[in-house]
Image (tube, rainbow, N blue to C red):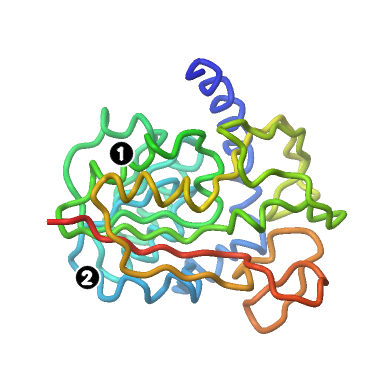
């Protein structure tokens, strides 16, 4: 199974390498404003960690580092990791241009204990990260491995119920309980630019809330806060409507559906 996962990872890595240049230039990431001082953090996670000045923060699956560097601007001692070589090289360049002291490592989550040492006050991951991971038991082991006793793990992610839908035709086409089986699809374009010339086969996993929370609890983390939101801070799916500034909703069902959940946990001392 792990050999098959490696094939999936390599195909996903190629797509994410190809996405970096498009994302960097896109209105979605608004890199010009970011370089001028605008934080890339959304209202959901921006205040969730409180004062991070002087705290060590490990950002899992950081893409090209805007969120990592937004925390660094607040004084956090940031390490960002991602499996895309192009993303990490871009993150390093941006860090140098801004004169910040974040560090970035090219690694997938599962191999991280082999290339990174130390413990962190905060482990952080958000928005479209865990669907690229097949095994959340192993993921939770890595989270726990890098957290100091008393350290905080924070996750904000698209809700697994939200991922049940085909956003084009409004039909339920994906499972909530998938037993580790991936969805494999030919894609064209990207959420930041649907007309971009990025094409390939990608593989992703929808994880139930119990799949997310149970292995973290087994690793000695306790829940401090759990929230669900009926909007997305990003206009990243087809047919979304901006209900309020920075709050995008999908679907016209006459009822509210969960778009995002957030989870704040602390490792027992």
Tell me which corner region of the image, top left, top right, bottom left or bottom right, holds residue 185: top right
Residue that extends furthest to the top in the rendered view of this protein: 3
Residue 53: assigned label: 2
Residue situated in front as seen by the camera: 71 or 86? 71
Where residue 228 sits in the image (x, y, percent)? 53, 70
Q: Residue at x 78, y 51 (%)?
A: 172
Depicted 253 relative to depicted 121: above or below: below
User: Foreground residue, 233 or 35?
Assistant: 233
How far is the residue under mark 2 from the one under mark 1?
Answer: 26 Å
Instruction: Please name whichever residue, 209 or 24, is drawn nearer the observer in this view of the structure.
Output: 209
Q: Position of residue 8 (x, y in %)?
A: 58, 25
Question: Extreme bottom residue here?
Answer: 244
The quadrant of the rendering that contains the C terminus is: bottom left
Residue at point 21%, 52% (across, down): 120
**Mark 1 nearby-residue class (10 Å; few <14, some 14–19, many ≥20):** some
Q: Name the residue under label 1.
A: 141
Confirm or deny contact between disc 2 and disc 1 (CB under 8 A).
Answer: no
Residue density around tag 2, few if under 14, some if 14–19, many if 20 or more, within 10 Å: few
Residue at 68% from the left image edge and 55% from the top image edge? 192
Give the image quarter of residue 32: bottom right
Give the SS element for disc 1.
Answer: helix
x then y, percent, for residue 126: 47, 57
Q: Position of residue 95 (x, y in %)?
A: 37, 54
Residue 3 vertical position relative to residue 125 in the rendered view, above or below: above
- Which of the two marks, 2 or 1, is nearer to us in this view? 1
Residue extending farthest right: 169
Report the disc number at residue 151.
Answer: none
Considering the numbered disc 2 on the image, is that residue within a helix, a strand or a loop? loop
> Along the polypeptide, which appears first: circle 2 or circle 1?
2
Residue closer to the observer: 56 or 88? 56
Residue 194 placement, left or right of 40: right
């Amino acid at each position: 199974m792990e050999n098959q996962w490696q094939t999936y990872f390599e195909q996903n890595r190629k797509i994410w390498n190809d996405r970096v240049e498009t994302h960097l230039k896109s209105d979605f990431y608004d890199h010009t404003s970011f370089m001028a001082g605008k934080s890339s953090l959304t209202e959901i996670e921006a205040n969730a960690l409180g004062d991070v000045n002087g705290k060590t923060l490990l950002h899992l699956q950081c893409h090209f580092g805007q969120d990592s560097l937004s925390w660094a601007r607040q004084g956090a001692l940031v390490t960002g990791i991602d499996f895309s070589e192009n993303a990490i090289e871009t993150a390093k360049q941006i860090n140098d241009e801004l004169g910040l002291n974040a560090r970035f490592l090219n690694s997938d989550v599962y191999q991280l204990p082999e290339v990174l040492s130390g413990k962190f006050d905060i482990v952080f991951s958000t928005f479209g990260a865990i669907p690229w991971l097949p095994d959340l038991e192993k993921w939770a082991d890595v989270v726990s491995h890098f957290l100091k006793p008393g350290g905080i793990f924070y996750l904000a992610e698209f809700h697994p119920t939200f991922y049940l839908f085909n956003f084009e035709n409004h039909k339920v086409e994906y499972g909530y309980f998938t037993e580790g089986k991936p969805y494999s699809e030919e894609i064209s374009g990207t959420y930041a630019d649907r007309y971009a010339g990025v094409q390939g086969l990608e593989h992703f996993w929808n994880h139930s809330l119990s799949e997310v929370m149970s292995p973290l609890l087994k690793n000695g983390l306790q829940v401090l806060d759990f929230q669900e939101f009926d909007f997305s801070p990003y206009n990243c799916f087809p047919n979304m409507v901006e209900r309020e500034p920075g709050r995008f909703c999908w679907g016209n069902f006459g009822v509210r559906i969960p778009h995002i959940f957030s989870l704040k946990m602390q490792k027992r001392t």
